[in-house]
Amino acid sequence: MHTESEIFPYTLPVPTPDGEFLARYSPKGLCGLEFPTRPKARKTSRASAPPPRQVLGWHAATTNALRRALAGRAPRRLPPLDLSRGTDFQQAVWRRLCQIPCGQTRSYTQLAQAVGRPKALRAVGGACGANPIPVLVPCHRLLAANGSLGGFSAGLDWKRALLAREGMAARP
């Protein structure tokens, strides 16, 4: 069994006006992004050795991309995304989510059709809930067919805020 530090050898903070996110990096790229939580609730396992230059470059790209996304703008450049911890289906959903432009939404039905599994609405929702890199893999842009919010791993307040920052609103 692998320890968390073996799976995510580098965990670095990303300060934003919305609080401090945590970015996790594997040898392949950004593999996790955590929303801000109360300081005592956060469990951090930062590497004892300084990150290599490559990880620092990825972290700069992550920081810039996250700040732009939180401001409702499309990131100019993303770091390499390591989505390898998901199933093939989850990875297909996450890749499709990355194709939804900033300021636009899709329904769970549309995404299920796009990944070739038109009846897999709940599975699409499950993949969104398991999304390891929210905001940058924009699962907040997925809505129910009637335009209502559906769910969001960080809570519906975050989903509403992210959509509003991109100039969109969903039904309550």
Image (tube, grey):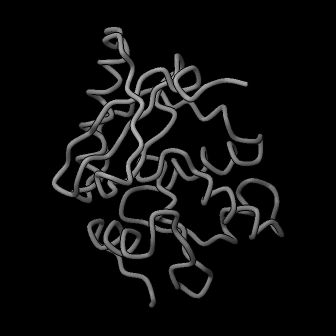
Where residue 143 sits: x, y (%)?
55, 74
Where residue 141 sits: x, y (%)?
47, 65
Where is 32 relative to 70, above or below? above
Work out which quarter of the rendered image holds the C terminus and state it.
bottom left
Residue placed farthest to the front in the image?
Answer: 40
Quick one: 75 or 20, which is closer to the camera?
20
Where is 144 relative to 10, above or below? below
Work out which quarter of the rendered image holds the N terminus and state it.
top right
Residue placed farthest to the left in the image?
Answer: 17
Where residue 7 sits: x, y (%)?
58, 25
Please name the residue shown 62% across and 53% down the image: 130
Please name the residue shown 35% across and 9% down the image: 52
Quick one: 92 or 47, which is closer to the camera?
47
Where is 157 relative to 5, above or below? below
Where is 126 relative to 62, above or below? below
Q: Quadrant of residue 57?
A: top left
Q: Quadrant of residue 165?
A: bottom left
151 vs 35, left or right, is: right
Please name the residue shown 67% across and 66% down the image: 125
Label tally: 0
138 vs 166, left or right, is: right
Quick one: 52 or 54, which is closer to the camera?
52
Please name the residue shown 31% across and 71% down the image: 161
